[in-house]
Amino acid sequence: MPGIPANITIAGRTPATIKGRVAPLINTLASARGGFRASGPDAPEFTVSKTDTSITALITNGYGAESYESRAGSGAWSAGLTVSGLTAETAYAMQVRGINSDGTGLAASVSITTNAPYNSVGVIFSESFDDQPDWVSPLGVFRATEATIPDGWFSTRAFPKWAPSTGHPDRHEAIEILASNADKSRSGIGKSFVSYRDCNDPGQSYWNSESMLTKYFPDGHSQIYAEFWIRFGPNWTRENITGSPMPYSKLFRVSSWRGNGSEYKAFSDGNLGPMALWIHNTSAYGMRMGIDLRGGPHSDNYQFVAGDLPDLGGFIVSGSNGDLNMSFKNSLSGMAKDGGYPSIPDRVNGGFITPSSGDIEHDNVFGPGDAWTKMAFFVKMNSAPGVTDGEYRQWLNDEQVLFSTQIPWIRPSATEDENAKWNIVAIGGNDLFQTYPNADRREEWYSIDDLVVRDSIPENLL
């Protein structure tokens, strides 16, 4: 067997001697790494989510990576897990590599074809936030006719606990849309909706912080589909802490509003209903699939009662008032588009979340670090009061994870001329967050970007 040449020098360094034989030295410093085995993490495992012009990697096993670089084909490597500016209906090799304190690791590649050109037919509202002027929410409730709020939006509701407006200048207001938050946008160079939830001691305010930005469609729609991307900050409380109340944050809602009075007031003396809310909550059982389904007509019968709602997959709904706290590994049988169990990647352990998975926490579903997750929702009003043909559907990274086609959104007590249509979409929400002492003045952020609202489900999800 021929020996290893003794006269090889790489990047100005001398060869190494291994068991008396001279071997070439491979320098893994960034300046000399090109083409050689990196010293960082092993090649990551990932799945992908795609649009017509972008591909986003969803890490299922990072092998110790602290951050990532990605590229499509032979393009330049860029920080993050999303590659944008691609051509529709084109095949790409999506490549991702991890980075940690040891250096940049090996790349993994997945072949993927971008979606057909984006069909704007059916889009009734979209928002990337990039073109919005810098804006920070004022304390209180304001409509566009009363104060400066983001262009194209109807109103905002912001009640922080720890913020400059409440006497804490070293904290943040409830909502920020700022160029200085570019690191919190999906592209890394634009803007996004950044919301802060605040924690206070148990026994004080029940819903202790609020941050809502609301879009109103005066004519209403019989059905609405909405999608957006969400990322949770690095200090987000990802697990339930024993001995403290369950962290509970409402992050998105679509509803029907009477059109007079307050668009934020519900229950029997309010003007809202039906409504569907998506909730982030963790309990002693781990990360939960939280949704609240509310009935109508407006203000009346706001909460469903026993027998109104059908069972959802493996989750028994009978007796529920519409507040559903479901398991990602035990409650979703039959909820996938093909009638099976949804293929939700386990973004910590690899593979998919199944009934045999171990404990499921926030990072298993939404990913660690700076991971982005695509959420989507669809609601369809029932055809007449009391008729059980209304719909609710939900997707996570384009995988259908929940659906029902038997929801009586408008209750039997409604009159035939009750004009209830879906006309409110709101991002952000209110928080029941009582995990840390007041002395910490704890605030945690999440970011929402690239919101699209349509009057129908996109073809790629049907």
Image: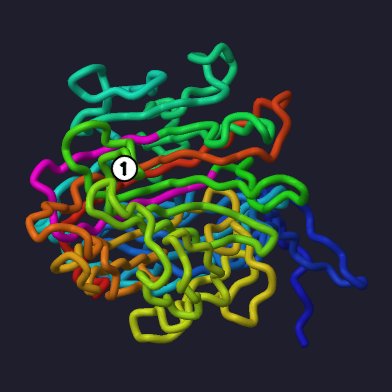
Residue 400 in sight here: no
Query: Magenta segment, which residues?
Result: 212-232
**Left or right relative to 356: residue 313:** left
> Is residue 422 shown above or below 59?
above
Q: Secondary structure at mark 1?
A: strand
* Residue 314 visible in this rendered orientation of the protein: yes
* Picture coordinates of residue 455, whole percent (x, y): 15, 58
Which quadrant is the C terminus positioned in?
Answer: bottom left
Residue 309: image location, x then y, percent:
37, 71
**Residue at 41% over, 52% down:** 76
Type of the residue with mark 1 = Ala
On whether residue 225 falls in the magenta region, the answer is: yes
**Secondary structure that dominates the magenta span:** strand
Residue 17, relative to residue 248: is it above or below?
A: below
Q: Residue at x 57, y 22 (%)?
A: 162
Residue 236 is situated, as x and y percent measured from the top left of the image, at: 60, 43
